[in-house]
Amino acid sequence: MNCNNKPASSLFLLLVLGLITACKPTVDPTAKPNILFILADDWSYPFASIYADSPIHTPNLERLATMGMVFTHAFCATPSCTPSRSAILTGKYPHKLGEGVNLVGKLDTSETTYVKLLRQHGYAVAFDRKGWAPGKFEKMGYSENPAGHQQEFGAFLDSLDNKKPFCFWWGTNDPHRPYTRGHGRKVGIDSTKLSVPKFLPDLPDVRGDLADYYAEIKRVDREIGALLKELEDKGLLENTMIVVTGDNGMPFPRAKANLYDYGTRVPLVISFPKRFKRNRRSETFVNLIDLMPTFLEVAGVPLPKDLDGSSLVPILAGKKQEHRDEVFLERERHCMCRKNELGYPGYPMRAIRTKEYLYILNLRPQRMPAGDPTIPGTPSEYGDVDGGPTKAYMMDHAMEDNVRTFFQIGFDKRPREELYDVRADPFNVNNLAQYPKYGRLKKNLQLKLDIWMSQNEDPRWHGGGDEIDRYPTYDKAWITKWDIVFFDE
Protein backbone atom coordinates (compact mmCIF):
# COMPACT_ATOMS: atom_id res chain seq x y z
CA MET A 1 0.00 0.00 0.00
CA ASN A 2 1.32 3.46 -0.88
CA CYS A 3 0.44 5.51 2.18
CA ASN A 4 1.53 8.72 0.47
CA ASN A 5 -1.62 8.58 -1.73
CA LYS A 6 -4.05 8.62 1.22
CA PRO A 7 -4.56 12.40 1.51
CA ALA A 8 -5.15 12.69 -2.24
CA SER A 9 -7.61 9.78 -2.21
CA SER A 10 -9.50 11.25 0.74
CA LEU A 11 -9.69 14.63 -0.95
CA PHE A 12 -11.00 13.02 -4.14
CA LEU A 13 -13.65 11.09 -2.16
CA LEU A 14 -14.79 14.27 -0.42
CA LEU A 15 -15.09 16.05 -3.76
CA VAL A 16 -17.18 13.20 -5.21
CA LEU A 17 -19.45 13.13 -2.17
CA GLY A 18 -19.85 16.87 -2.40
CA LEU A 19 -20.90 16.67 -6.03
CA ILE A 20 -23.42 13.90 -5.26
CA THR A 21 -24.89 15.92 -2.40
CA ALA A 22 -25.10 19.03 -4.56
CA CYS A 23 -26.99 17.15 -7.27
CA LYS A 24 -29.44 15.36 -4.97
CA PRO A 25 -32.46 17.34 -3.69
CA THR A 26 -32.39 17.76 0.06
CA VAL A 27 -35.16 18.21 2.59
CA ASP A 28 -34.98 20.83 5.30
CA PRO A 29 -35.53 18.84 8.53
CA THR A 30 -37.43 21.79 10.02
CA ALA A 31 -39.67 22.29 6.97
CA LYS A 32 -43.43 22.11 7.42
CA PRO A 33 -44.89 18.94 5.93
CA ASN A 34 -46.55 18.90 2.53
CA ILE A 35 -49.89 17.19 1.90
CA LEU A 36 -50.94 15.36 -1.27
CA PHE A 37 -54.60 14.36 -1.21
CA ILE A 38 -55.52 11.86 -3.94
CA LEU A 39 -59.28 11.48 -4.32
CA ALA A 40 -60.77 8.93 -6.71
CA ASP A 41 -64.34 9.18 -7.95
CA ASP A 42 -66.75 6.31 -7.09
CA TRP A 43 -64.16 3.89 -5.65
CA SER A 44 -65.58 1.21 -3.35
CA TYR A 45 -63.79 -0.89 -0.77
CA PRO A 46 -62.32 -3.55 -1.23
CA PHE A 47 -61.28 -2.94 -4.84
CA ALA A 48 -57.51 -2.61 -4.35
CA SER A 49 -54.91 -5.29 -3.72
CA ILE A 50 -54.06 -3.81 -0.33
CA TYR A 51 -57.22 -5.64 0.75
CA ALA A 52 -57.18 -9.44 0.84
CA ASP A 53 -60.29 -10.08 -1.24
CA SER A 54 -59.58 -7.61 -4.02
CA PRO A 55 -59.96 -8.86 -7.61
CA ILE A 56 -57.38 -6.43 -9.04
CA HIS A 57 -53.68 -5.69 -8.58
CA THR A 58 -52.77 -2.14 -7.54
CA PRO A 59 -48.97 -2.19 -7.08
CA ASN A 60 -48.46 1.54 -6.53
CA LEU A 61 -51.05 1.58 -3.78
CA GLU A 62 -49.31 -1.47 -2.30
CA ARG A 63 -46.05 0.46 -2.27
CA LEU A 64 -47.75 3.38 -0.56
CA ALA A 65 -49.24 1.00 2.00
CA THR A 66 -45.77 -0.22 2.98
CA MET A 67 -44.90 3.41 3.67
CA GLY A 68 -47.90 4.11 5.89
CA MET A 69 -51.22 2.83 7.23
CA VAL A 70 -54.08 1.01 5.53
CA PHE A 71 -57.56 1.58 6.98
CA THR A 72 -60.11 -1.21 6.53
CA HIS A 73 -63.18 0.62 7.86
CA ALA A 74 -63.20 4.02 6.19
CA PHE A 75 -66.53 5.53 5.14
CA CYS A 76 -67.62 8.65 3.30
CA ALA A 77 -70.07 10.86 5.17
CA THR A 78 -72.58 10.57 2.32
CA PRO A 79 -72.49 8.56 -0.94
CA SER A 80 -72.90 11.49 -3.32
CA CYS A 81 -70.13 13.58 -4.91
CA THR A 82 -70.81 17.22 -3.98
CA PRO A 83 -71.83 16.78 -0.33
CA SER A 84 -69.13 14.17 0.27
CA ARG A 85 -66.47 16.59 -0.99
CA SER A 86 -67.97 19.46 0.98
CA ALA A 87 -67.84 17.33 4.13
CA ILE A 88 -64.17 16.51 3.49
CA LEU A 89 -63.32 20.20 3.02
CA THR A 90 -65.14 21.35 6.17
CA GLY A 91 -64.84 18.40 8.56
CA LYS A 92 -68.61 18.58 9.11
CA TYR A 93 -71.55 16.26 8.62
CA PRO A 94 -73.33 17.18 5.36
CA HIS A 95 -76.63 18.05 7.04
CA LYS A 96 -74.83 20.89 8.86
CA LEU A 97 -73.92 22.54 5.55
CA GLY A 98 -77.37 23.87 4.68
CA GLU A 99 -77.88 23.69 0.92
CA GLY A 100 -74.57 21.85 0.69
CA VAL A 101 -76.24 18.61 1.79
CA ASN A 102 -77.49 17.88 -1.75
CA LEU A 103 -75.73 17.02 -5.00
CA VAL A 104 -74.99 20.22 -6.95
CA GLY A 105 -75.77 22.09 -3.74
CA LYS A 106 -74.18 25.21 -2.31
CA LEU A 107 -71.07 25.20 -0.15
CA ASP A 108 -71.51 28.58 1.49
CA THR A 109 -68.51 30.90 1.38
CA SER A 110 -68.86 31.42 5.14
CA GLU A 111 -67.89 27.79 5.79
CA THR A 112 -64.38 27.25 7.12
CA THR A 113 -62.40 24.82 4.97
CA TYR A 114 -58.92 23.39 5.36
CA VAL A 115 -58.03 25.25 2.15
CA LYS A 116 -58.73 28.61 3.79
CA LEU A 117 -56.95 27.74 7.03
CA LEU A 118 -53.83 26.26 5.43
CA ARG A 119 -53.47 29.32 3.20
CA GLN A 120 -53.75 31.58 6.21
CA HIS A 121 -50.84 29.66 7.72
CA GLY A 122 -48.52 29.94 4.75
CA TYR A 123 -49.45 26.93 2.61
CA ALA A 124 -49.73 26.93 -1.16
CA VAL A 125 -53.01 25.18 -1.96
CA ALA A 126 -54.24 23.99 -5.36
CA PHE A 127 -56.00 21.12 -7.13
CA ASP A 128 -56.15 19.43 -10.49
CA ARG A 129 -58.89 17.59 -12.41
CA LYS A 130 -62.00 17.05 -10.25
CA GLY A 131 -61.97 19.18 -7.12
CA TRP A 132 -65.10 20.27 -5.31
CA ALA A 133 -67.79 19.17 -7.76
CA PRO A 134 -70.23 19.00 -9.34
CA GLY A 135 -71.61 22.51 -9.04
CA LYS A 136 -71.12 26.08 -10.22
CA PHE A 137 -68.91 27.62 -7.54
CA GLU A 138 -68.94 30.94 -9.44
CA LYS A 139 -72.65 31.27 -8.60
CA MET A 140 -71.91 30.84 -4.89
CA GLY A 141 -69.54 33.77 -4.44
CA TYR A 142 -66.26 31.90 -5.00
CA SER A 143 -63.55 33.23 -7.29
CA GLU A 144 -62.06 29.74 -7.58
CA ASN A 145 -62.98 26.15 -6.80
CA PRO A 146 -63.31 25.58 -3.02
CA ALA A 147 -60.46 23.04 -3.37
CA GLY A 148 -58.11 25.85 -4.48
CA HIS A 149 -56.91 27.23 -7.80
CA GLN A 150 -56.54 24.69 -10.59
CA GLN A 151 -53.06 23.81 -11.82
CA GLU A 152 -51.30 20.72 -13.17
CA PHE A 153 -49.38 19.00 -10.38
CA GLY A 154 -45.91 19.15 -11.97
CA ALA A 155 -46.31 22.82 -12.89
CA PHE A 156 -47.56 23.52 -9.38
CA LEU A 157 -44.47 21.93 -7.84
CA ASP A 158 -42.19 23.87 -10.21
CA SER A 159 -43.85 27.14 -9.22
CA LEU A 160 -43.29 26.71 -5.48
CA ASP A 161 -40.89 28.63 -3.34
CA ASN A 162 -38.56 25.97 -1.87
CA LYS A 163 -39.52 26.98 1.66
CA LYS A 164 -43.28 27.11 1.10
CA PRO A 165 -45.24 23.99 2.11
CA PHE A 166 -48.09 22.83 -0.06
CA CYS A 167 -51.41 21.00 0.09
CA PHE A 168 -52.53 19.63 -3.26
CA TRP A 169 -55.85 17.95 -4.08
CA TRP A 170 -55.45 15.59 -7.04
CA GLY A 171 -58.92 14.41 -8.03
CA THR A 172 -59.19 11.83 -10.78
CA ASN A 173 -62.53 11.22 -12.52
CA ASP A 174 -61.81 7.49 -12.46
CA PRO A 175 -63.52 5.10 -11.86
CA HIS A 176 -66.61 7.24 -12.53
CA ARG A 177 -68.76 6.41 -15.54
CA PRO A 178 -68.88 6.40 -18.53
CA TYR A 179 -66.60 3.46 -19.38
CA THR A 180 -65.32 2.39 -22.76
CA ARG A 181 -67.13 -0.87 -23.17
CA GLY A 182 -64.66 -3.76 -23.43
CA HIS A 183 -61.80 -1.74 -21.94
CA GLY A 184 -61.40 -4.22 -19.10
CA ARG A 185 -60.98 -7.12 -21.51
CA LYS A 186 -58.44 -5.15 -23.57
CA VAL A 187 -56.23 -4.56 -20.52
CA GLY A 188 -56.30 -8.21 -19.55
CA ILE A 189 -59.15 -8.49 -17.04
CA ASP A 190 -60.95 -11.79 -17.50
CA SER A 191 -64.59 -11.10 -16.62
CA THR A 192 -65.35 -14.82 -16.34
CA LYS A 193 -63.05 -15.06 -13.31
CA LEU A 194 -64.53 -12.12 -11.40
CA SER A 195 -66.63 -12.41 -8.26
CA VAL A 196 -69.93 -10.58 -8.77
CA PRO A 197 -71.28 -8.71 -5.71
CA LYS A 198 -74.33 -10.51 -4.34
CA PHE A 199 -76.61 -7.52 -4.97
CA LEU A 200 -76.08 -7.80 -8.75
CA PRO A 201 -77.14 -10.57 -11.14
CA ASP A 202 -74.30 -12.82 -12.29
CA LEU A 203 -74.61 -12.24 -16.03
CA PRO A 204 -72.14 -11.51 -18.88
CA ASP A 205 -73.23 -7.88 -19.25
CA VAL A 206 -72.68 -7.26 -15.55
CA ARG A 207 -69.34 -9.05 -15.53
CA GLY A 208 -68.15 -7.01 -18.49
CA ASP A 209 -69.28 -3.80 -16.79
CA LEU A 210 -67.38 -4.76 -13.63
CA ALA A 211 -64.26 -5.52 -15.68
CA ASP A 212 -64.44 -2.03 -17.21
CA TYR A 213 -64.82 -0.56 -13.71
CA TYR A 214 -61.77 -2.45 -12.47
CA ALA A 215 -59.77 -1.26 -15.49
CA GLU A 216 -60.34 2.34 -14.42
CA ILE A 217 -59.18 1.53 -10.88
CA LYS A 218 -55.97 0.13 -12.37
CA ARG A 219 -55.55 3.42 -14.22
CA VAL A 220 -55.94 5.30 -10.91
CA ASP A 221 -53.14 3.14 -9.52
CA ARG A 222 -50.83 3.91 -12.46
CA GLU A 223 -51.40 7.62 -11.98
CA ILE A 224 -50.66 7.30 -8.26
CA GLY A 225 -47.31 5.85 -9.33
CA ALA A 226 -46.68 8.87 -11.57
CA LEU A 227 -47.45 11.28 -8.73
CA LEU A 228 -45.07 9.45 -6.40
CA LYS A 229 -42.32 9.68 -9.01
CA GLU A 230 -42.80 13.43 -9.36
CA LEU A 231 -42.40 13.83 -5.61
CA GLU A 232 -39.32 11.59 -5.61
CA ASP A 233 -37.69 13.42 -8.51
CA LYS A 234 -38.06 16.72 -6.66
CA GLY A 235 -36.91 15.34 -3.31
CA LEU A 236 -40.31 15.96 -1.74
CA LEU A 237 -41.56 12.44 -1.02
CA GLU A 238 -40.04 12.15 2.45
CA ASN A 239 -41.69 15.33 3.71
CA THR A 240 -45.12 14.77 2.14
CA MET A 241 -48.11 13.15 3.81
CA ILE A 242 -50.03 11.28 1.11
CA VAL A 243 -53.71 10.39 1.51
CA VAL A 244 -55.54 8.17 -1.00
CA THR A 245 -59.27 7.46 -0.85
CA GLY A 246 -62.56 7.64 -2.78
CA ASP A 247 -65.44 10.09 -2.43
CA ASN A 248 -68.16 7.38 -2.44
CA GLY A 249 -68.89 3.90 -3.68
CA MET A 250 -69.18 2.20 -7.06
CA PRO A 251 -71.69 3.48 -9.69
CA PHE A 252 -73.88 0.38 -9.78
CA PRO A 253 -77.43 -0.34 -8.56
CA ARG A 254 -77.70 -0.56 -4.74
CA ALA A 255 -74.20 0.92 -4.29
CA LYS A 256 -73.51 4.61 -4.96
CA ALA A 257 -76.21 6.93 -3.56
CA ASN A 258 -77.11 4.27 -0.97
CA LEU A 259 -76.01 3.71 2.62
CA TYR A 260 -75.11 0.07 2.07
CA ASP A 261 -71.40 -0.71 2.41
CA TYR A 262 -70.75 -0.67 -1.34
CA GLY A 263 -72.08 2.88 -1.41
CA THR A 264 -70.21 4.30 1.58
CA ARG A 265 -67.19 2.13 2.43
CA VAL A 266 -64.04 3.29 0.64
CA PRO A 267 -60.32 2.47 0.50
CA LEU A 268 -58.04 4.66 2.61
CA VAL A 269 -54.25 4.77 2.82
CA ILE A 270 -52.25 7.44 4.65
CA SER A 271 -48.48 7.61 4.31
CA PHE A 272 -45.98 9.94 5.96
CA PRO A 273 -42.87 7.88 6.82
CA LYS A 274 -40.93 10.89 8.06
CA ARG A 275 -43.33 11.17 11.00
CA PHE A 276 -45.46 8.01 11.26
CA LYS A 277 -44.66 4.30 11.41
CA ARG A 278 -44.65 2.21 8.26
CA ASN A 279 -46.52 -0.82 6.99
CA ARG A 280 -49.43 -0.94 9.43
CA ARG A 281 -53.14 -1.67 9.24
CA SER A 282 -56.01 -0.34 11.30
CA GLU A 283 -59.54 -1.70 11.69
CA THR A 284 -60.79 1.35 13.58
CA PHE A 285 -63.67 3.29 12.04
CA VAL A 286 -62.93 6.44 10.07
CA ASN A 287 -65.32 8.97 8.55
CA LEU A 288 -63.78 11.06 5.76
CA ILE A 289 -64.77 14.18 7.72
CA ASP A 290 -61.74 13.20 9.85
CA LEU A 291 -59.34 14.17 7.05
CA MET A 292 -59.77 17.93 7.45
CA PRO A 293 -58.63 18.01 11.11
CA THR A 294 -55.88 15.50 10.25
CA PHE A 295 -54.49 17.85 7.60
CA LEU A 296 -54.61 20.77 10.01
CA GLU A 297 -52.90 18.94 12.88
CA VAL A 298 -50.11 17.66 10.65
CA ALA A 299 -49.59 21.22 9.42
CA GLY A 300 -49.56 22.62 12.96
CA VAL A 301 -52.74 24.64 12.39
CA PRO A 302 -55.17 25.08 15.34
CA LEU A 303 -58.44 23.22 14.85
CA PRO A 304 -61.77 25.07 14.70
CA LYS A 305 -64.11 24.29 17.59
CA ASP A 306 -67.16 23.35 15.53
CA LEU A 307 -65.78 20.31 13.71
CA ASP A 308 -67.51 16.94 13.63
CA GLY A 309 -64.39 15.19 12.38
CA SER A 310 -61.46 14.39 14.63
CA SER A 311 -57.79 14.07 13.73
CA LEU A 312 -56.30 10.69 12.85
CA VAL A 313 -52.82 11.75 13.96
CA PRO A 314 -52.97 9.82 17.28
CA ILE A 315 -53.79 6.64 15.30
CA LEU A 316 -51.11 7.30 12.70
CA ALA A 317 -48.54 8.04 15.39
CA GLY A 318 -49.33 4.84 17.27
CA LYS A 319 -50.55 6.65 20.37
CA LYS A 320 -54.09 5.24 20.06
CA GLN A 321 -55.58 2.08 18.61
CA GLU A 322 -59.23 3.11 18.37
CA HIS A 323 -60.54 6.23 16.68
CA ARG A 324 -64.29 5.59 16.34
CA ASP A 325 -66.45 2.68 17.49
CA GLU A 326 -68.99 3.31 14.74
CA VAL A 327 -69.87 5.75 12.00
CA PHE A 328 -73.06 7.65 11.24
CA LEU A 329 -74.04 8.00 7.60
CA GLU A 330 -76.55 10.11 5.72
CA ARG A 331 -77.97 10.75 2.30
CA GLU A 332 -80.25 13.43 0.86
CA ARG A 333 -81.09 14.41 -2.72
CA HIS A 334 -78.70 12.85 -5.19
CA CYS A 335 -80.27 13.56 -8.58
CA MET A 336 -83.44 15.41 -9.53
CA CYS A 337 -85.32 12.25 -10.41
CA ARG A 338 -88.56 12.47 -8.39
CA LYS A 339 -91.33 14.94 -9.04
CA ASN A 340 -94.00 15.94 -6.51
CA GLU A 341 -95.43 18.94 -4.67
CA LEU A 342 -92.01 19.68 -3.14
CA GLY A 343 -90.39 20.01 -6.53
CA TYR A 344 -87.67 17.39 -6.96
CA PRO A 345 -87.27 15.73 -3.56
CA GLY A 346 -84.53 13.29 -2.61
CA TYR A 347 -84.56 10.03 -0.74
CA PRO A 348 -83.44 10.91 2.81
CA MET A 349 -81.70 8.17 4.76
CA ARG A 350 -79.73 7.95 7.99
CA ALA A 351 -77.67 5.02 9.24
CA ILE A 352 -75.36 3.74 11.93
CA ARG A 353 -72.63 1.25 11.00
CA THR A 354 -70.88 -0.77 13.72
CA LYS A 355 -68.42 -3.63 13.30
CA GLU A 356 -71.28 -6.12 13.47
CA TYR A 357 -74.34 -4.36 12.05
CA LEU A 358 -75.66 -1.76 9.67
CA TYR A 359 -78.96 -0.13 10.65
CA ILE A 360 -80.63 2.11 8.05
CA LEU A 361 -83.60 4.41 8.56
CA ASN A 362 -85.42 5.31 5.33
CA LEU A 363 -87.10 8.55 6.30
CA ARG A 364 -89.45 8.81 3.31
CA PRO A 365 -90.09 5.16 2.37
CA GLN A 366 -93.08 6.07 0.21
CA ARG A 367 -90.62 7.44 -2.37
CA MET A 368 -88.64 5.42 -4.88
CA PRO A 369 -85.05 5.00 -3.63
CA ALA A 370 -83.54 4.79 -7.11
CA GLY A 371 -85.69 7.59 -8.49
CA ASP A 372 -89.03 7.41 -10.28
CA PRO A 373 -89.30 4.94 -13.18
CA THR A 374 -89.99 7.88 -15.51
CA ILE A 375 -90.70 11.59 -15.27
CA PRO A 376 -92.94 12.98 -18.03
CA GLY A 377 -91.17 15.37 -20.37
CA THR A 378 -87.69 14.13 -19.47
CA PRO A 379 -85.52 11.14 -20.39
CA SER A 380 -84.99 10.29 -16.70
CA GLU A 381 -85.43 6.63 -15.73
CA TYR A 382 -84.52 5.63 -12.17
CA GLY A 383 -82.20 8.62 -12.24
CA ASP A 384 -80.34 7.94 -8.98
CA VAL A 385 -78.68 4.90 -10.58
CA ASP A 386 -75.83 5.73 -12.94
CA GLY A 387 -76.47 4.85 -16.55
CA GLY A 388 -74.50 1.90 -17.94
CA PRO A 389 -74.73 -1.70 -19.15
CA THR A 390 -75.69 -3.13 -15.76
CA LYS A 391 -78.55 -0.69 -15.23
CA ALA A 392 -79.76 -1.09 -18.81
CA TYR A 393 -79.78 -4.88 -18.64
CA MET A 394 -81.56 -4.96 -15.29
CA MET A 395 -84.25 -2.57 -16.53
CA ASP A 396 -84.75 -4.44 -19.81
CA HIS A 397 -85.00 -7.83 -18.08
CA ALA A 398 -86.57 -6.80 -14.77
CA MET A 399 -89.28 -9.46 -14.80
CA GLU A 400 -87.06 -12.39 -15.73
CA ASP A 401 -86.32 -14.98 -13.06
CA ASN A 402 -82.55 -14.39 -12.95
CA VAL A 403 -82.95 -10.60 -12.59
CA ARG A 404 -86.25 -9.99 -10.76
CA THR A 405 -84.97 -10.19 -7.17
CA PHE A 406 -81.92 -8.05 -7.94
CA PHE A 407 -84.08 -5.45 -9.63
CA GLN A 408 -86.42 -5.33 -6.65
CA ILE A 409 -83.66 -4.72 -4.08
CA GLY A 410 -81.93 -2.21 -6.33
CA PHE A 411 -84.85 -0.17 -7.68
CA ASP A 412 -88.09 -0.84 -5.80
CA LYS A 413 -89.42 0.73 -2.60
CA ARG A 414 -87.89 -0.30 0.71
CA PRO A 415 -89.20 -0.66 4.27
CA ARG A 416 -88.63 2.14 6.75
CA GLU A 417 -86.05 0.12 8.67
CA GLU A 418 -83.25 -2.11 7.45
CA LEU A 419 -80.80 -4.17 9.52
CA TYR A 420 -77.85 -6.17 8.23
CA ASP A 421 -75.34 -8.47 9.87
CA VAL A 422 -72.29 -7.17 8.00
CA ARG A 423 -70.04 -10.09 8.93
CA ALA A 424 -72.40 -12.80 7.72
CA ASP A 425 -73.83 -10.62 4.94
CA PRO A 426 -71.13 -8.22 3.64
CA PHE A 427 -73.24 -7.32 0.59
CA ASN A 428 -76.20 -6.19 2.74
CA VAL A 429 -78.95 -8.16 1.01
CA ASN A 430 -80.64 -10.03 3.89
CA ASN A 431 -82.74 -7.53 5.85
CA LEU A 432 -83.10 -8.72 9.45
CA ALA A 433 -85.31 -5.83 10.62
CA GLN A 434 -88.45 -7.87 10.01
CA TYR A 435 -87.51 -10.65 12.47
CA PRO A 436 -88.67 -10.36 16.11
CA LYS A 437 -85.50 -11.90 17.52
CA TYR A 438 -83.57 -8.81 16.38
CA GLY A 439 -86.04 -6.43 17.97
CA ARG A 440 -83.91 -5.42 20.95
CA LEU A 441 -80.80 -4.97 18.83
CA LYS A 442 -82.73 -2.90 16.30
CA LYS A 443 -84.17 -0.73 19.06
CA ASN A 444 -80.72 -0.08 20.56
CA LEU A 445 -79.28 0.95 17.21
CA GLN A 446 -82.31 3.10 16.43
CA LEU A 447 -81.88 4.84 19.81
CA LYS A 448 -78.20 5.54 19.11
CA LEU A 449 -79.10 6.97 15.73
CA ASP A 450 -81.89 9.08 17.24
CA ILE A 451 -79.52 10.50 19.87
CA TRP A 452 -76.94 11.31 17.21
CA MET A 453 -79.55 13.09 15.07
CA SER A 454 -80.72 15.09 18.08
CA GLN A 455 -77.26 16.05 19.32
CA ASN A 456 -76.14 17.02 15.83
CA GLU A 457 -79.23 19.12 15.09
CA ASP A 458 -80.24 17.03 12.12
CA PRO A 459 -83.16 18.74 10.32
CA ARG A 460 -84.65 15.30 9.65
CA TRP A 461 -84.93 14.45 13.35
CA HIS A 462 -88.48 13.40 14.28
CA GLY A 463 -89.94 13.84 10.81
CA GLY A 464 -88.66 17.29 9.84
CA GLY A 465 -86.44 18.42 7.00
CA ASP A 466 -88.84 19.05 4.10
CA GLU A 467 -86.95 22.30 3.43
CA ILE A 468 -84.01 20.17 2.24
CA ASP A 469 -86.13 18.89 -0.64
CA ARG A 470 -86.80 22.48 -1.74
CA TYR A 471 -83.15 23.55 -1.86
CA PRO A 472 -82.14 24.64 -5.38
CA THR A 473 -79.31 23.25 -7.48
CA TYR A 474 -76.52 25.54 -8.63
CA ASP A 475 -76.17 24.22 -12.15
CA LYS A 476 -79.51 24.34 -13.94
CA ALA A 477 -78.10 22.46 -16.91
CA TRP A 478 -78.16 19.38 -14.72
CA ILE A 479 -81.93 19.61 -14.46
CA THR A 480 -82.37 18.96 -18.18
CA LYS A 481 -79.42 16.60 -18.73
CA TRP A 482 -80.74 14.02 -16.30
CA ASP A 483 -79.00 10.68 -16.25
CA ILE A 484 -77.89 10.92 -19.87
CA VAL A 485 -75.03 13.16 -18.77
CA PHE A 486 -75.79 13.54 -15.07
CA PHE A 487 -73.65 10.51 -14.31
CA ASP A 488 -71.16 10.83 -17.12
CA GLU A 489 -69.31 14.02 -16.24
Image (tube, grey):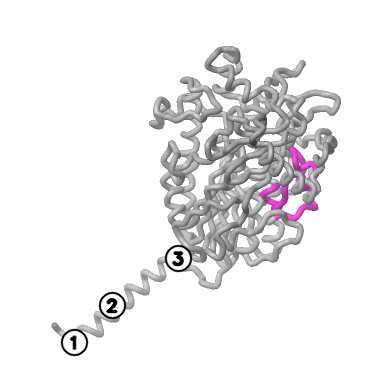
Check disc 3: other Cα within 10 Å, few if <14, some if 14-19, many if 20+.
Answer: few
Q: What residue is pinned by disc 1? A: 4
Query: On the rendered image, what quadrant is the C terminus found in?
Result: top right
Q: Foreground: 179 or 122? A: 179
Q: SS class of the residue under badge 1? A: helix
Q: Residue at x 62, y 34 (%)?
A: 256
- Look at the image and give the residue range highlighted in magenta: 87-113
Instruction: Residue type at mark 2: give it.
Output: Phe
Instruction: Residue type at mark 1: give it.
Output: Asn
Q: Residue at x 65, y 36 (%)?
A: 438
Say whether residue 133 is visible: no
Q: What residue is pinned by disc 3? A: 25
Q: Foreground: 195 or 125? A: 195
Going from N to C along the chain, the mark reached first, 1 or 3, is 1
Q: Which mark is residue 12?
A: 2
- The reply to whether callout 2 and callout 1 are in contact (CB within 8 Å) is no
Residue 153 on image: x %, y %:
55, 51
Residue 137 on image: x %, y %:
74, 43
